[in-house]
């Protein structure tokens, strides 16, 4: 039997039954707290989250590589938003984005956010939509523009992106 020490009173026996009941409750509470803190699904349609500079997401197995300027990546159980690309422009410039995008679980999208926080959805998919390919021309106003990935409902997605200017984000 374990003993607890109380100042001025000496050791007091603590029964194993108390430990067996309290420990599972503490673990369950910690698990609930952890899981509740990982849900960022609300940012999927939140223009301020999509248009802002911050990343707010949880994910499993987030992998990206860049080979000869082409960014490929995949993610599992994505909830939230993540910046994939950014570009500072003097204004009046354009960028051509060619993409392949597929969602195998949940829903996900690629969005373009201008420096003012205005958001345009470039491609959006749900489970089973199959790979979607396309090319879009982005008008780059003065300032820093972004392409962000947003996911909800435990999104699993993969992408290949090629763009003719700017910087791939590794934040």
Image (tube, grey):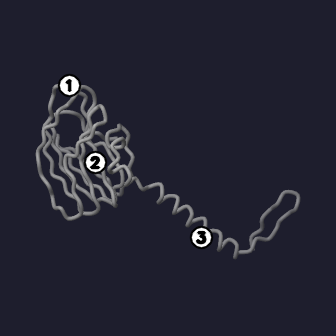
Give residue 19's quadrant in the image: bottom right
Horizontal and vertical percent for residue 22?
A: 65, 69
Contact (CB < 8 A) between labels 1 and 2? no
Residue 7 or residue 124, whichever sits in front: 124
Spatial CA distance of label 2 from label 3 is 37 Å
Split into 4 quadrants, where in the image is the N terminus? bottom right
Which circle marks residue 149 in the picture?
2
Secondary structure of the residue carrying tag 3 is: helix
Horizontal and vertical percent for residue 133?
A: 12, 52
Report the mark closest to the observer, 3 or 1.
Answer: 1
Label 1: few (<14), some (14–19) or many (≥20) C-alpha neighbours in 10 Å:
few
Report the mark closest to the observer, 1 or 2.
Answer: 1
Secondary structure of the residue carrying tag 1 is: loop
Q: Residue at x 30, y 32 (%)?
A: 116
Q: Residue at x 17, y 40 (%)?
A: 69
Spatial CA distance of label 1 from label 2 is 24 Å
Spatial CA distance of label 3 from label 1 is 58 Å
Residue 47 or residue 58, whichever sits in front: 47
Contact (CB < 8 A) between labels 2 and 3? no
Disc 1 target residue? 91
Disc 3 target residue? 24
Q: Is residue 128 above or below residue 93?
A: below
Pick whichever of labels 3 and 1 is earlier in the sequence: 3
Q: Residue at x 15, y 42 (%)?
A: 162
Contact (CB < 8 A) between labels 3 and 1? no
Report the mark closest to the observer, 2 or 3.
Answer: 2
Horizontal and vertical percent for residue 53?
A: 35, 37
Give residue 158's quadrant in the image: bottom left
Q: Residue at x 20, y 57 (%)?
A: 102
How many marks the image carries: the answer is: 3
Pick whichever of labels 1 and 2 is earlier in the sequence: 1
Horizontal and vertical percent for residue 11?
A: 83, 65
């Amino acid at each position: 039997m374990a003993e607890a020490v109380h100042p001025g009173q000496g050791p007091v026996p603590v029964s194993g039954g108390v430990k067996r009941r309290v420990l599972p409750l503490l673990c369950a509470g910690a698990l609930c707290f952890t899981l509740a803190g990982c849900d960022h699904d609300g940012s999927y349609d939140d223009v301020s989250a999509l248009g802002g500079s911050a990343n707010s997401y949880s994910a499993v197995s987030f992998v990206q590589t860049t080979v000869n300027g082409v960014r490929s990546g995949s993610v599992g159980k994505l909830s939230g938003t993540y910046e994939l690309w950014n570009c500072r422009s003097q204004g009046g410039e354009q960028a051509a984005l060619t993409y392949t995008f597929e969602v195998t679980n949940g829903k996900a999208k690629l969005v373009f956010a201008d420096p003012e926080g205005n958001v345009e959805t470039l491609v959006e998919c749900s489970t089973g939509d199959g790979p979607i390919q396309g090319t879009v021309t982005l008008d780059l106003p003065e300032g820093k523009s972004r392409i962000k990935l947003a996911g909800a409902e435990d999104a699993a997605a993969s992408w290949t992106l090629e763009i003719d200017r700017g910087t791939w984000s590794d934040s």
